[in-house]
């Protein structure tokens, strides 16, 4: 369960910004959009945060930093999981519009709950090199890594310490190494990154998300009924769906699975979804003909929205059953506003504790009957070109559906583009 995430000196983020999933205790609206954390002290007394949000919507003009915010979270996950690019650890792209930032580290910090324990974890990178790293469980320090590479262990650390520290190179995170050696202290925190957070790609209908949805259809008990019910709820006119298996040789590019998708694919394994192996699956959509028979259509004959929704079946089923976090850029792309609303409603109404953080331009979701003020976030470019991040809850007198939508569209909350009249004969100044 995500509590909050912070980033600084990464892409368009110059100063530190924080996305918080902590539910405001003053806001009593839409209790189904929140859930209890269950955190308690040794005497069973509740600890803060008491409640977290199930979703956070990020609004902002094009090029304001929405994608960079979600990308920063993905970057942190990939570094912890030890993914590399061309044989080297991923290096963050620093804020490039301020020369002073070029020599400063990029900072990433996150707080989350795993197995009933709150963790806080942070690292700073100077290019590929790790210059700072620390992990806390509650208020107890587990380890702290200094800029010279020295690692200090807290009293709560269990398992090997110095032997693990000797195996950490300047470019590797200690949490990654400790997890690889199955350290009992760091293991649960690392498991959160591996099993409790996943990202949707920019084109899920062309990526592993679609294949995982098809494997769910093929391999899970009542998989066809589950997939079909997910689609028919959106009124797509589909009577049935099948999956046709083909050899990978017919789709030679399919083997190259980007690291971006690795986490979600790993999460789906072991949940009744078969591995791709040497084949891939092609969906066939069944539509009811006038004579009552079923006519099979290739996916290419379906609308872009139908294809997109089909690819989201497996990620959403994983999300709803795993108390996990799903990160989703362009949440509303190719989907009718009522379908986007329906997906969000599914997340809010379940008794489980799923979370979704998504970027969107769909103002129809700015509905006080759907989202609380603390669930709405904005990205806006400052004059120096950096991105600011802030919540709708920071504004006073946020009242009603019409007021919120119109207030956003008229610029009351910022985070909108300033459109100028275009003159074909004019030049940009």
Image (spheres, grey):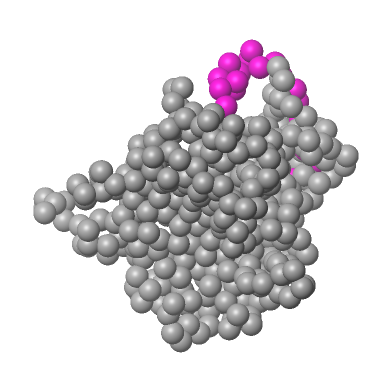
Q: Residue at x 76, y 61 (%)?
A: 352
Count up the numbered dots: 0
Q: Position of residue 141 (x, y in %)?
A: 57, 55
Judge from the rendering whether residue 190 lies leftward or rightward of residue 68; answer left or right.
right
Image location (x, y in percent) of residue 371: 58, 71
Q: Which residue in the rendered view is the most extreme toward the top?
A: 249
Choose between 291 and 2: the one closer to the eye.
Answer: 2
The reply to whether residue 414 is visible in this rendering is: yes
Q: Quadrant of the N terminus?
A: bottom right
Q: Residue at x 47, y 45 (%)?
A: 145
- Compared with 277, 74 (above or below) is below
- Magenta-colored span: 238-257
Q: Residue 248: say if magenta.
A: yes
**Membership of 295 in magenta stretch:** no
- In this view, 90 is above or below 136: above
Q: Nearer the viewer, residue 229 or 381?
A: 381
Name the residue rendered at 47%, 30% in the picture. 169
Q: Quadrant of the C terminus?
A: bottom left
Instruction: Please name the residue shown 68% across and 54% down the image.
Output: 114
Query: In x, y percent, where is residue 106?
Result: 37, 47
Instruction: Return the residue found at the far right.
Output: 221
Residue 105 lies, in percent from the top left, at: 34, 46
Name above or below for residue 30 compared with residue 96: below
Depth check, front residue: 404 or 6: 6
Q: Is residue 225 left or right of residue 406?
A: right
Q: Is residue 288 visible?
A: no
Between 35 and 289, the one nearer to me in the picture: 35
**In the drawing, does residue 99 fall left or right of residue 212?**
left
Q: Residue furthest bottom?
A: 397
């Amino acid at each position: 369960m995500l509590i909050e995430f912070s980033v600084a000196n990464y892409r368009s983020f110059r100063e530190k910004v924080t996305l918080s999933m902590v539910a405001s205790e003053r806001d009593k609206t839409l209790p189904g959009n929140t859930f209890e954390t269950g955190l308690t002290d040794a005497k069973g007394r509740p600890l803060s945060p008491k409640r977290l949000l199930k979703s956070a919507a990020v609004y902002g003009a094009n090029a304001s930093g929405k994608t960079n915010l979600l990308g920063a979270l993905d970057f942190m996950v990939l570094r912890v999981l030890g993914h590399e690019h061309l044989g080297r650890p991923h290096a963050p792209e620093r804020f490039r519009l301020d020369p002073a930032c070029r020599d400063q580290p990029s900072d990433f910090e996150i707080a989350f709950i795993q197995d009933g324990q709150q963790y806080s974890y942070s690292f700073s990178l100077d290019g590929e090199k790790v210059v700072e790293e620390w992990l806390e469980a509650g208020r107890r320090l587990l380890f702290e890594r200094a800029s010279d590479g020295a690692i200090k262990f807290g009293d709560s650390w269990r398992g090997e310490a110095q032997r693990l520290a000797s195996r950490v190179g300047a470019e590797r995170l200690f949490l990654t190494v400790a997890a690889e050696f199955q350290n009992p202290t760091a293991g649960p925190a690392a498991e959160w990154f591996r099993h409790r957070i996943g990202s949707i790609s920019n084109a899920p209908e062309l990526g592993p998300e679609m294949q995982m949805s098809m494997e769910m259809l093929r391999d899970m008990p009542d998989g066809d009924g589950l997939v079909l019910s997910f689609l028919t709820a959106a009124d797509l006119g589909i009577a049935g769906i099948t999956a046709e298996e083909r050899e990978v040789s017919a789709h030679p590019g399919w083997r190259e699975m980007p690291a971006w998708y690795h986490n979600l694919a790993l999460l789906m394994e072991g949940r009744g979804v078969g591995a791709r192996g040497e084949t891939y699956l092609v969906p066939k959509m069944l539509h009811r003909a006038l004579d009552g028979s079923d006519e099979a259509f290739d996916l290419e004959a379906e609308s872009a929205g139908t294809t997109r929704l089909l690819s989201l079946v497996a990620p959403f089923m994983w999300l709803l059953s795993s108390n996990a976090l799903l990160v989703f850029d362009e949440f509303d792309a190719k989907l009718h506003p009522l379908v986007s609303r329906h997906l969000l409603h599914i997340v809010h109404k379940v008794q489980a504790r799923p979370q979704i953080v998504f970027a969107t331009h769909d103002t129809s979701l700015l509905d006080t009957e759907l989202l609380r003020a603390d669930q709405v976030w904005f990205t806006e470019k400052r004059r120096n070109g950096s991105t600011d991040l802030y919540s709708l809850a920071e504004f006073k007198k946020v009242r009603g559906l019409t007021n919120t939508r119109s207030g956003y569209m008229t610029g009351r909350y910022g985070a909108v583009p300033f459109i100028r009249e275009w003159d074909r004969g004019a030049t940009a100044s």
